[in-house]
Amino acid sequence: MSERTGPVIELRDVHVVHKARTGSLFRPDRVHAVAGVDFEVARGETVGIVGESGSGKSTLARVMVGLQRPTSGEVLFRGRPLRGGARARRELGRAVSVVFQDPATALNPRMVVREQLLDPLRVHGIGDDRSRQARVRELIQLVGLPLSALDVLPRQISGGQRQRVAIARALTLEPDVVVADEPTSALDVSVRAQVLNLLTDLKDELGLGLVFISHDINTVRYVSDRVAVMNGGKVVETGPVEQVLRTPSDPYTQTLLAATPSLL
Ligand SMILES: Nc1ncnc2c1ncn2[C@@H]1O[C@H](COP(=O)(O)OP(=O)(O)OP(=O)(O)O)[C@@H](O)[C@H]1O
Ligand SMILES: [Mg+2]
């Protein structure tokens, strides 16, 4: 864990153009999913990204965690441009982790929880068997699950518990930043607040940077220090969350605010 205070990840004028799956004569075969975005996140802060479906939030998240190469623009990791180098990508993979919407897809259905948590430690060659086992026990307790949860398969636990396991997995390598892409949207309403509180508690406890992505502006407001509002691949408004939401200057932000009853 580093103590430096600058941004861990910085995006400068990032564009991502997807080749659409549905290209045909009458439909555009390219989607400009991210269209010139500047963004940064440091340890200790929560930055919310809000915007409706298709606005480019997940594509942006994938760029941040190194799963998607930008079509143009620059990604800086700890102040240095991230180029093709395998070593820098590996380091990025360690420093920035991701929690997806659906824990079922993030976890291997045939592997017991213990193995899923050991896996990143083995891949990155961290510790020996003994210290890895100790780390895994620590992680499962950190996310509020009993040690017995280590010996079950993902389908043997509830959706909320699975998301806790996915969060534990995201924390395995002691990241600087966790990118959480709609981490509660697939969960039963009754457990959403618990998982959300777990994430924010861990962020405080571990001094993490958290990028929290949601289509629900009230959830974003509840957890974030800063917020970026996305529409059509662009960040249309950004700033401290209370300022942006109290006095939104962009008409799209005003529409979002007017339209949302909160379910968390
Ligand atoms: N791999 C892909 N190939 C082609 N098009 C894609 C791909 N991924 C995303 N898109 C398109 O890019 C645009 C942005 O998608 P993205 O998933 O980033 O939006 P989002 O804001 O996360 O939406 P949601 O709230 O539904 O998750 C959409 O038009 C989507 O159809
Ligand atoms: Mg998405």
Image: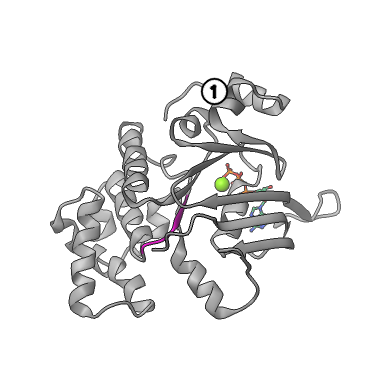
Q: x, y percentage for residue 118?
A: 28, 71
Magenta-colored stretch includes residue 175: yes
Q: x, y percentage for residue 174?
A: 36, 62
Visible residue check, residue 63: yes
- Give the magenta range: 174-179
Residue in view at x 61 percent, y 56 percent: 10
Q: x, y percentage for residue 134?
A: 18, 68
Q: Vertically, is 155 above or below 236?
A: below
Q: Is residue 28 shown left or right of residue 257?
A: right
Q: Ligand 1: does it lie within 8 Å of the C-beta at label 1?
A: no
- Between 195 and 102, the residue placed more toward the observer is 195
Visible residue check, residue 152: no
- Between 201 and 165, the residue placed more toward the observer is 201
Residue in view at x 31 percent, y 46 percent: 159
Q: How crowded is mark 1: few (under 14 residues within 10 Å), some or many (20 or more)?
A: few
Magenta-colored stretch includes residue 167: no
- Give the amino acid at mark 1: Thr
Q: Is residue 116 shown left or right of residue 147?
A: right
Q: Is residue 237 shown left or right of residue 112?
A: right
Q: Which SS class for mark 1? A: loop
Residue in view at x 57 percent, y 58 percent: 9
Q: Vertically, is 158 above or below 218?
A: below
Q: Quadrant of the C terminus?
A: top left
Q: Is residue 16 shown left or right of residue 3?
A: right
Task: Tell me where residue 199 sits by quadrant.
Answer: top left
- Between 242 and 97, the residue placed more toward the observer is 242
Which residue corresponds to mark 1? Answer: 260
Identity of the residue furthest to the right in this view: 25
Task: Tell me where residue 229 sits by quadrant.
Answer: top right
Q: How is the image coloured?
A: one colour
